[in-house]
Amino acid sequence: MSDDNYTVNCDTHGESGGAFICQHLVNDSEKLGFYLGYDPERPDSLHPDAWCGECEVVLNREGEWNDVATAFADIKIVCGKCYENIRDKNWLEDAEIVNTLLADCREYLEKKQPKLVEQFKLDVHERWDWDQTTGKLIFSHDGEPQVVASVQFAGSFSTETNTWMWAWANESLDDNIKSGSKVVRDIGQQRGYRKLAAGHWPADVVDAWEMTAVLAKHIDAIGFYRTPSDNGFLYMAITDAVWVVRS
């Protein structure tokens, strides 16, 4: 099923694309589990089909989505915003393990970042420009390039909605600039970590920094950078950087 092919007029959130969930996840459900059905033809979907823990038990028992499993799930359609709210209330994970992962990644980036800033004077350049086609972030002064860095976009933080969106979920970004974020997404899906697996969720600037740190560690980045956008900031991990040598 594809949420792009359905429009929902939600009483709370207005008109938007639809998302499919089992009947048990509707009506203010909490902590029921949130299992995702990934469509290989749409791996970057923000709202893959979802079902609760009881449906997962039935599905495993039946071995497939047969008449019994389908009838038990009795799939419903909701708007994307409702889907995200339901997901966040029902997702189950080991918070201690997730926090340990985040702490490890923060420590990694906290050690890398000062060295990067010092070596390439990232805090003193007059101007920056990035090109997602080439995957380059260019720092310049007086119109002359000074430092050229290779980057992978982590995602964006909106100060208007206080939400984080992973780069892989942003359709306006080229694939080459967001391949690293897909590595993080795959880890989140395999281990069941919501903040890594979900493309869009409520967040603050600390979350944005932590998600960038997760990306940085898993692609062996040497640091990170953020640039302002129309409604917040875009975060990226720097994989390498060089001074431009002028004759």
Image (tube, helix red, strand yellow):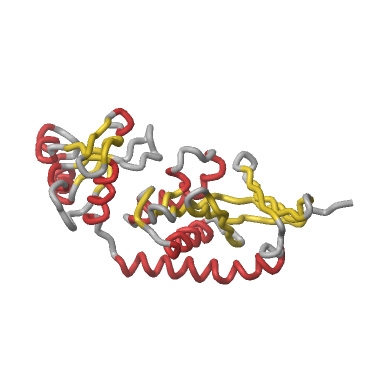
- The residue under the point 76% across, 55% down is 141
Quadrant including the N terminus: top left
Residue 140's x, y, as percent?
Answer: 74, 53
Q: Nearer the viewer, residue 120 or 63?
A: 120
Instruction: Answer above or below: position of 228 versus 44.
Output: below
Q: From what the image shows, is residue 208 above or below residue 81?
A: below
Q: In the rendered image, which quarter is residue 204 located in?
A: bottom left
* Residue 57 x %, y %: 15, 48
Q: How many marks?
A: 0
At horizontal 60% and vertical 42% (from top left) the residue drawn is 132
Rendered residue at 47%/47% (across/down): 167
Task: Estimate the x, y position of residue 198 in percent, counting from the top left.
Answer: 35, 50
- The single residue placed furthest to the top in the displayed view is 5
> Residue at (32%, 69%) from the top-left corner?
96
Q: Is residue 6 left or right of residue 220?
A: left
Residue 18: x percent and y percent? 27, 36
